[in-house]
């Protein structure tokens, strides 16, 4: 088996045909991690012993003819998703030794299928960032050029899949955190419709934007993982009833492109690659039409108000009392202030302070409430456009993966999220599919193509995504 | 914010007039976050720069949409409670200090010295 090219679909066939066992497969992945991860640093912890036990259990399921789509499939999990009894740190010092006391709903669901958990993977601390440089435990490197970032915040999971160190992965996407690193690492990343996948057991960053999603080498693999984790959950207060959004809709094969929005500081060859993909879709019989989403000009600003507002609220729970790092001090307020100072990294602290400001009395109307109102404009722009198109195409990032340290100015880093944040503000699903490369310093770096559908439109994304894959290969 | 075409982003600090004076030290107190003097000097530049970056929403023309968020929380029915004490031990294990079946904390209210 060649782990560089192996897919979940092919592994499923081979496992069921008994060409190799789930234990063989897991051992191969553990070997690959031992060989490569010293350089890439995708994993924060590898669970070799329990992975082998899970593989043996999967082999029993397969032998008994009880194989399911993910039985025996070795996966990586982002470090902000809880597995009962395992450390889950969100790549933060404040949770460095925190052990989860229950399974996230998505974990429970895939455990029932008999998956193999290889380990927990790196991320920007508390899912705040765009490069995985904000991890308290050191950055992950891009497998295509280790002097460059893998993207973020799910840089660990995407690098693990890209480097053949996991067959697939679960991540989370708050403003592009699955799609952008998938684009940078050359894998497929799905951000489902808000509410389609339970957030129970996902550490909350910005609750109205967070969504668990899937990462695989192919669109089909991302889809198989999505089907395993989706569904209503009473434990998530914004979970969607299964029947509410998934109707049958006739696909017209019309893709809209918001031309005016593409001006925004794109690297020339990244834009050219995007145009080439559109051209190949046109040759496949799709109509490519110009659309207008005027409120998208405000998307970054709205996002960088709502995100810190919700982050500052959610992260108030890390106070050094119930769990996590606790700094000794004489008074309770010093315990809070010192634990949080020692436990949170620089970007996390910035977001907490900005969030505290935009929610403070006197400024909440001009910032937080105004942002919430503009967010509704963005949602209605999307709603209007989806009356006439099946999907919207956008680049994933205006730029190719950058070198470590190149975006040390926080605002420069925020600006790179321009094409991914509108999706989370609108709550619609989107996918990143690899589509060609650009050259930097003699190295070929992947470029991601983003497709966005209306609420519940995941099937549309999968079917167009497969066409993009075909034309790219 | 101005964005130029060769893909680098920069802020025009001189054009920034509208953002209010920001007392970062007061924000840090509100957020219960201890900040060193050195970091404070850095944050006093960064926080206004970030707020300037989001300033553009003031230009957006919002009308009736205000205060009508599309999302709302739906709570599950409060039924089938688990057996009392079932998770007590597990949750207390994560706490830093305990006193019987309680989490122990520093004194919250104290007399003036």
Image (cartoon, helix red, strand yellow):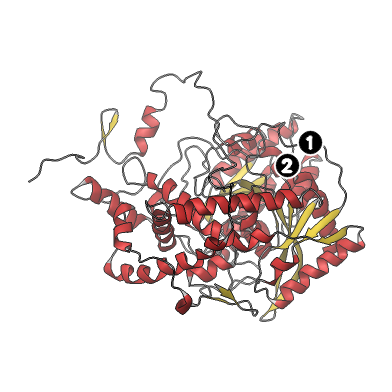
Evaluate whether residue A90 shows in this view: no
Residue A237 point in image, percent of width and height: 55, 34
Q: How much space separates mark 1 and mark 2, taking CA atoms?
A: 8 Å
Q: Nearer the viewer, residue B16 or A426?
A: B16
- Please tell me how crowded label 2 is: few (under 14), some (14-19), or many (20+) other residues with Cα within 10 Å: many
Name the residue nearer the viewer: B101 or A302.
A302
| Quarter containing the C terminus of chain A | bottom right
Q: Mark 1 points at which residue?
A: A247
Element type at marker 2?
Answer: loop
Residue B103 occupies quadrant: top left
Q: Name the residue tied to disc 2.
A: A456
State the mark number for residue B80.
none
Q: Quadrant of residue B1?
A: bottom right
Q: Which of marks 1 and 2 is nearer the N terminus?
A: 1
User: CB atoms at circles 1 and 2 under 8 Å apart?
Assistant: yes
**Label 1 crowd bin: few (<14), some (14–19), many (20+), radius 10 Å:** few
Q: Can residue A349 be seen in this view?
A: yes
Q: In this view, does A187 lie to the left or right of A332?
A: right
Relative placement, left or right, of A180 versus B101 is right
Image position of A40 with respect to A250: above or below: below
Write down the chain letter for disc 2. A
Q: Mark 1 lies on which chain?
A: A
Residue B57 location (% of width, % of height): 54, 61
Looking at this view, name the residue that lies furthest to the front. Answer: B63
């Amino acid at each position: 088996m060649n782990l560089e090219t192996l897919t979940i679909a092919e592994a499923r066939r081979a496992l069921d045909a008994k060409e190799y066992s789930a234990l063989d497969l897991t051992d191969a992945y553990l070997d690959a991690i031992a060989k490569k991860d010293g350089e890439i640093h995708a994993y924060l912890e590898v669970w070799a012993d329990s992975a082998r036990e899970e593989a043996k259990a999967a082999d029993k399921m397969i032998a008994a003819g009880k194989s399911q789509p993910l039985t025996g499939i070795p996966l990586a999990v982002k470090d902000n998703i809880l597995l009962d009894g395992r450390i889950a740190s969100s790549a933060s010092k404040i949770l460095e030794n925190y052990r989860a006391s229950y399974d996230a709903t998505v974990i429970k669901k895939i455990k029932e299928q008999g998956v193999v958990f290889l380990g927990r993977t790196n991320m920007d601390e508390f899912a705040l960032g765009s490069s995985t440089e904000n991890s308290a435990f050191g950055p992950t490197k891009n497998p295509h050029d280790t002097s460059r970032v893998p993207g973020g915040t799910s840089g660990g999971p995407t690098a693990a899949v890209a480097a053949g160190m996991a067959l697939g992965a679960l991540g989370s996407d708050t403003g592009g955190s699955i799609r952008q690193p998938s684009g940078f690492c050359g894998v497929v990343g799905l951000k489902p419709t808000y509410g389609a996948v339970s957030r129970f057991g996902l550490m909350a960053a910005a609750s109205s934007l967070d969504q668990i999603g899937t990462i695989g080498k192919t669109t089909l693999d991302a889809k198989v993982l999505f089907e395993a984790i989706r569904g209503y959950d009473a434990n998530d207060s914004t979970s969607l009833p299964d029947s509410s959004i998934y109707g049958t809709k006739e696909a017209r094969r019309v893709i809209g492109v918001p031309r005016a929005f593409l001006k925004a500081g794109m690297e020339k060859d990244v834009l050219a690659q995007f145009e080439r993909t559109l051209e190949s879709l046109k040759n496949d019989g799709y109509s490519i039409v110009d659309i207008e989403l005027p409120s998208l000009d405000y998307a970054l600003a709205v996002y960088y108000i709502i995100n810190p507002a919700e982050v500052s609220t959610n992260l108030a729970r890390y106070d050094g009392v119930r769990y996590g790092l606790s700094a000794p001090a004489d008074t309770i307020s010093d315990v809070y202030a010192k634990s949080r100072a020692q436990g949170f990294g620089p970007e996390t602290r910035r977001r907490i302070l900005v969030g505290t400001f935009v929610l403070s009395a006197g400024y909440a109307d001009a910032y937080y409430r105004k942002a919430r109102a503009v967010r509704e404009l963005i949602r209605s722009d999307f709603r209007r456009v989806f009356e006439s198109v099946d999907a919207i195409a956008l680049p994933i990032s205006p730029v190719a993966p950058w070198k470590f340290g190149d975006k040390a100015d926080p605002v420069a880093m925020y600006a790179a999220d321009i094409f991914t944040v509108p999706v989370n503000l609108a709550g619609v699903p989107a996918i990143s599919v690899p589509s060609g490369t650009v050259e930097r310093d003699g190295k070929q770096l992947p470029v991601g193509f983003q497709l966005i559908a209306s609420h519940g439109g995941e099937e549309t994304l999968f079917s167009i995504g497969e066409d993009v894959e075909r034309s790219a290969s | 914010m101005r964005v130029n075409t060769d893909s680098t982003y920069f802020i025009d600090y001189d054009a920034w007039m509208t953002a209010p004076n920001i007392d970062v030290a007061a924000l840090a107190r509100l957020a219960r976050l201890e900040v060193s003097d050195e970091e404070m000097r850095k944050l006093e530049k960064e926080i206004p720069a970030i707020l300037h970056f989001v300033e553009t929403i003031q230009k957006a023309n919002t009308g009736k949409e205000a205060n009508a968020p599309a999302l709302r929380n739906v709570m599950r029915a409060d039924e089938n409670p688990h057996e009392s004490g079932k998770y007590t031990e597990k949750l207390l294990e994560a706490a830093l200090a305990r006193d019987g079946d309680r989490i122990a904390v520093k004194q919250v209210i104290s007399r003036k010295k």
